[in-house]
Image (cartoon, helix red, strand yellow):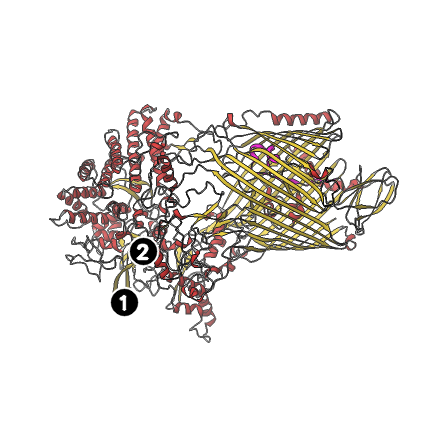
Amino acid sequence: MNPNKLLMQKMKIKQVLTVFPFMLMLLFSHNAFSQIKGKVTDVNGAPIPGVSVVVQGTTIGTLTDINGNYSLTTDSESRILTFSFIGMKSISVTIAGRTEINVTLETEEQMIDEVVVIGYGTQRKESVTGAIASTSIVEVKRSTSANLSTAIAGRISGLTALQTGGRPGFDYSTLYLRGAATTNETDPLILIDGVARENMNTLDPAEIETISVLKDASATALFGVQGANGVILINTKRGALGKMRLTVDAKRSYQSFTREPERIHSLEYMRLRNEAVVNDGQEPVFTEEVMAKYANPLAGLDPNAADYEEQKAIRLYMYCDHDWYRELIKQFVPLTRMNINASGGTEKLSYFVNASFIDQKGNLNTEPKSYLGYDPSVWMKRYSLRTNLDFKLTSSLKSFLNIGTYIEQANMPSATIYGNDDFWAFQDYIYQTISMTPITIGPVTLPGFGVEPGRVIDSGYLWHSPYEMMNRTGSREELKGNLNSSFGLEWDLSNSVTKGLSVKAMLSFDSHSYKSWQGSKAEILYLADLDYENDQLSYSIFRFKETTLSLASSSMSRYKLNSQVSINYKNTFGQKHDLTGMLLAQRDNWDTYSNDIPFNVIGVAGRFTYAYDQKYFAEVNIGYNGSEQFAPSKRYGFFPAVSASWVVSKENFLKNNSIITNLKLRASYGVVGNDKMGSARFLYQDKITVGSGGLGSISQGQRINLGLLGNPNLGWEVAKKQNYGVDIQLIKSINISFDYYFEHRSNILITRGNTPALQGIPLSNVPKGNLGIVDNEGLEIELKYNKMLFKDLSLSVSGNFGYNHNIQVYADEPMSDETYAYVYRKTGYSIGQQWGFRIDYSNGNGYFNSQEELDRWLETKTCSFGTPRVGDFIYKDLNGDNVIDDRDEAPIKYSSIPGITYGLTLDASYKSFDFSVFIQGIGRYSGYYWRDVVTETPYRGTYFGYHKTAWTAERYAKGEKITYPALSQYFGYNHKPNDFFIMNRAFTRLKNIELGYTLPEGALKKLGIQNLRVFVSGQNLFTWDHLRMDHLDPENTDMVGYPIQKTQSFGFNVTF
Amino acid sequence: MKNILRYIALVILILTLSNCEGVLDEKPDGNITMDEIFSDNNKVGAWLNSCYTYIPIKGNRYYFWIFGPAAWSDEGWDADAEYNPTMMSGRLYNGVASASDHPILDNPLDAGNGDYWNRYWAGIRLCTIFLDRIDDATVDNPADRKRWKAEAHVLRAWYYMELLMWFGDVLPIEREPYSLDEDFSKLKRASYYEVVKFIQEDCNAALATNELPWRITTSAEGYRVTKACAATIRQKMMLYAASPLNNDGENHWEEAYQISKESLELLKSNGYELYNSVSYPNIYLSDDAFLGPDKNIHSAILNEYFCTTPDFAASPRDKETIFHTNAGQDYIYYRNGIGVQSGFRTSLCPSQELVDAYETIDGQPILDLSNPYLDEQHTLPNYNPDNTLYDPDNPYENRDPRFYASIYYNGSKRKAFWSFDELPASVENYPAPAGYRTRIIATWVGEPKTGTENQKRTGCRTGYYGRKFLHPNSGSNMPIAGSRYKYFRLGEVILDFAEAACEAGHLSESVEAVNEIRRRAGMPDLPDGLTQDELRLRVRNERRVELAFEEPRYFDLRRWTKPGDDLSSTHKWIGAMEITRNSDGTYNYKRRPVRPVERACYTEKYIWLPIPHAEANRLRTLTGEDWQNPGW
């Protein structure tokens, strides 16, 4: 075939796809027969603007105006009009020759017709028997977060999202669904449009229709060996019958770190350093004379001298008082989000098209490109495009095509020195910036000292100068591309085979690509030397290496293929017996960026439901699938779950009860599996390979590499899950759901604890065993309250609370001997339990407050990791052997996996104003803060606010508040994991607050605008926590890394 | 149309469900079985190559480029302990060590140093499997089979030696490879002596193999073990077994003497001899080398020996080195030199105690070797009354040539690239620009560049900088990497023999061995008529001086303790020389501890490394016995 012709064809297809939605607009012209008008009001008689009025079976439709009025013309008097509005019950009315039809819409309080997305399908909420939660996408859209996993934090009961950090493009969250029930990977399975996909974080909220979380076995059994950690289902939006609806959203935000370290001035720094040095029994490092120079750098200069200004600048440069943090970290950086989408449809075809753009700047205060010649500034830009089309091929055959793509560009300083690990690079920028002392001279040289001005000064004590790393090493750009595409057919066999039978097939292809360009260079580094006595500055060379910018690039790609075929059956017999059945087969095939063999998953899933009189519901879900991890005979597993529910409120004794308007009981039990066990694959096979690197004179330098030994008997983790739930609705407006669950996870693949290392196979290579057992239980409460309080004021409150607790029942853990206060570290404790030394607070504050007190302690006790000084912590000798050592370590506080998650949303609207507040929090969550960003010991002393009131004899004598043990230069005795440094990381956050105003419609009608809303909002504005220091955010799972952001935004939403 | 669509649906259906057979099987990935290995000549050799991978690099390759054992004994102070107290030395000095987290064991594995317990047992297992299967394995050349087998014997002995040195007698003897379903409850600790006997068996098997050479003569065969390694290991371990800490109250000195003597004779008769001449006089005897206050050939020989990499030849330049490791020590001037020279760091600062150990040139110790200091903190020297040459106000004159080859002291000179302009406060050196030039190493307190202080990473903690492995002129203009770590050298074997002979009562042989070392160093012979106790002190001091910074001191101090003793006399306080400069250019010398806080790593438990806590738990659970070393 002529390649040009092929290209032409391709282009044509492309053109058609692009202009398609716009062509559709032309289809909306019709010949009119009948004029109908009317008014739509709510139960209180207030008009409802924006109600969609559609003539069924046609493409004719309109929206009500600000006064609730509509008018349209239809082709036939026998048509049916459908009135629908979000949050209201839809109503269909036959025209029957009328010319005016007024309707009253009721608030959809009962939620009975709400549809819930379940595994490979949907279900009416009423018939749900398992534990499934979902969130309103309207709420999620309020978040400014560029990452979806972070935007849903606190929105869904049972789902914990912990943000790792705030770096643009990397501000995603770690997700736990119902806590953790295994010591292996706990990540839930995430399906986007029915396919396991990894790009959840980069989905634009505007393209999402629903997010549904499947929690119990009845909901996840379908996913078999992949379902044990729960499943998150994300479905993107589709077009609906009706006129094109075009919306444009724009938001401009300013981001800053939620927490920043308090500025420590030079003199404060020197006093604190002296305090630490003196505490350690040494002479102060900064004499009074030296400190006087910093107190008054200009002393001795003659203001009338000709070179006074020059000398003044030099003195201020020498006896500096740097605020390095502010100099290197910008306080506010912008984030812009734009989104445009169109949806609509005809009988034949419906469409949803969305385009989004995010431009996020980072907080590193880099120098401009005009000065450097390259741009090391931090920014991320993401362009997303989605087109979802549904096309009816024949009356019984429908097809759909989903295409979602994005391109993400990220720019940053070169990471060459960090082995191209930009995660480490960013950690280092922040950490070194924090660690720099205010008396460090720099960042560049001054003219007149024998060195060209503007050359980089190395601090001389940090690993690198953060200024150098951010500005003078080059720049890096990363480009990520992603394509999600699915094509499917749905064939209704009602007419050809039997009523209610259909088959569906879907083929999905995804591809991801990654490319990086990096220009790297090195400059000569200088040290600034200061001669205090003679007030003299000089420079010396610190490093000679100098290279010019050289460019390197690398690229990677990966793919995913998924095919699914399902048979669905749905029918009602004798009016009371509802029966559905679903059988689905699928195959997944994908690879990763790393040098791996492609991955495969294959399996079958089935669901059978039966309902009697919409009162009693029963459901069986099964998954039958296989995992490459296990030997052929152990490969496939059968995972069944049964569940049932009873709508008690439909029984006669509760029918028409005005208080309990709905009551439903649910129960489920099932078995699911987990084959996610770290990066090791094909666990049943020995990993013995021949490699190189040996001595050349033996077998040409070949070497045998012995890896993990296989265990042909291995299988997946088995999760036996029970769930009991109650859904209650009171006085038609308060909805409460309550779930209790218990999970027994066994066969957890763990390293054997009782194989001694001295047999010689590294324990990491000893075949693992299905030995571990974890019990996990918890409860979840969801609450929703919707009420139109007065004519113009409506209020809705919704909240969720989840409590979770796990115990490692068996961990094959060798027991410590009885000299240990606690003989186990895992068995009997939660996964991630913190361990450390208990501080003896019996004297009131837990510090050795005097030499006598210390001496008395030292008479009987010693410590294996250093001798305490006055002002140090008093540790408890838990095992009573008079030695403080690891035998005295005890469980302290909670685990590193949160045990409580909650969220509370309040929405109110008054006339044209709307207001919402969202508070979110985490509880039963602890962490050991040991890194250099909290202690005073790194380098030449790094001090934060709480170090200023560290223990000193004077402060103690005066009865002042003491917030830290006596400062030291050395990391040691005090800094062990203990009651102090293992901190309670629970927090409550004002996650989102938003005020919106919808403009009166008339003003903008000429512009074709139906609706214009402007808003201001804030995210993470306040956080209440229990940390001992106030410069870190309690959520940041990477304590040293890029901080979490708070945001102030304004923006608008327009609907055309 | 309808039919076409139905066919499409059908095709998708078939595509999905067909071809599922074998979808989950692993694709061919090059994995092989044990039997495949031992039925292929090349793979058998490849297995032996894997046995080799557990030899650590040592030298300054302890994490993070430090001379680990030298910094952790009484030979010096790691300046990084202040700079980053969470690194190995800082943690040890502060006593932040436990069985579950020990700085020596659990620091990131660098060049094979660290994680010793797991590492050497893994090596031993590979050797044992090799020895178990080599007789029946497919090996094309019969000579290869014999030599390979002998090499595996040497390697297993070596790994047992390392385990014994670090952990002591907490080891079972592994003759047959363990299987995973072994009944580990039957594991038994062997005594120190039993393990040493097992090591000897392996070494003797190697020594009895004609195919195993005494010396590697071509660089192609570089870094393979030899009979010389076997001879060295077996005598060294017997010396250790006879030492006070390990002898279980038995006297094994005569046996140690016999084995040491035989081994030494074998080594000498097979061409090993002390390094005794300068090969590169243009460097080491140049005016720019500053080896010794006056150009000293003995200082030059020793500095050259440690700064150059041994060669492989039938008659090599370096006939002393028995085995040197397979990787170098990177840029000593940059990582372990005079920190300020290039601005990175100083690392190891030699201790005052070590400096005091160098005799004066007349062969007289400076201090009373039996009780060198009158106070706990080593600030009051107990001078040897017979020494007439030592001048406390001019302490670096008239010293052992090895002192000048190993240490930069106040007033010594170095010609190298100095990366800074001198400041007026550096009175000895001002004015001078950055560049390649001679600088006086002034270590007095307050000297802005090389003066003693206790903060900077580039600073000097003790008044001294190391130079034993430092090329005289290396710097950023002449980036000469350090040599390779000399794992075994004849000098140490001679001193091993000297010690065994002294302890076994063969005093004259011992004196003769010590004198052999002293003559090479340019020191006079030991005086006649030394008693055994006096000779023991001289032998031990000779080891300290000759083998300084090379690692033996760390282990010597331990094995010389008696069971139940600690290391408080040597490890608790480390001395510095606080030098102050008077306005007339003279100096005052005052001994003081490096830091006012004691070093914590002197207690009894620091004699041995702990068995990793989890492993100790496993062993106790399995066998019902406590295997853990005392104190951990």
Label 1: state its secondary structure. loop
Task: Please provide the residue range marked out in magenta.
Answer: A213-241
Q: Amino acid at mark 1?
A: Asn
- Percent position of residue A620, x then y: 63, 31
Q: Nearer the viewer, residue B527 or B319?
A: B527
Identify the residue at horizontal 36%, vertical 40% (top origin): B616
As drawn, the label of residue A669 is none
Task: Name the outermost residue toward the front.
Answer: A653
Q: Which residue is disc 1 drawn over?
A: B582
How busy is the neighbourhood of tag 2: few (under 14 within 10 Å), some, or many (20 plus)?
some
Q: Work out whether residue A331 or residue A1 is closer to the camera in this orientation and state it.
A: A331
Report the chain holding disc 2: B
Q: Residue furthest bottom?
A: A304
* Numbered mark located on residue B598 in the image: 2
Observer able to see residue A815: yes
Callout 1 and callout 2 share a chain: yes
The magenta stretch spans residue A236: yes
Q: Is residue B301 visible?
A: no
What percent of the width, then of the height, locates residue B245?
Answer: 24, 43
Residue A60 lies, in percent from the top left, at: 80, 41
Does the magenta portion include B134? Answer: no
Residue B364 lies left or right of residue A685; in this view the side is: left
Which corner quadrant of the image does residue B244 belong to? Answer: top left
In this orientation, which residue lies closer to the viewer: B256 or A746? A746
Cα separation, mark 1 vs mark 2, equals 30 Å
Q: Secondary structure at mark 2?
A: loop
Say which quadrant the C terminus of chain B sits in.
Answer: top left
Category of crowding for the residue at label 1, using alpha-carbon neighbours closer than 10 angstroms: few (below 14), some (14–19), many (at least 20): few
> Could you tell whether B99 is left or right of A444 in the image?
left
**Picture quarter with the N terminus of chain B:** top right
* Type of the residue with mark 2: Glu
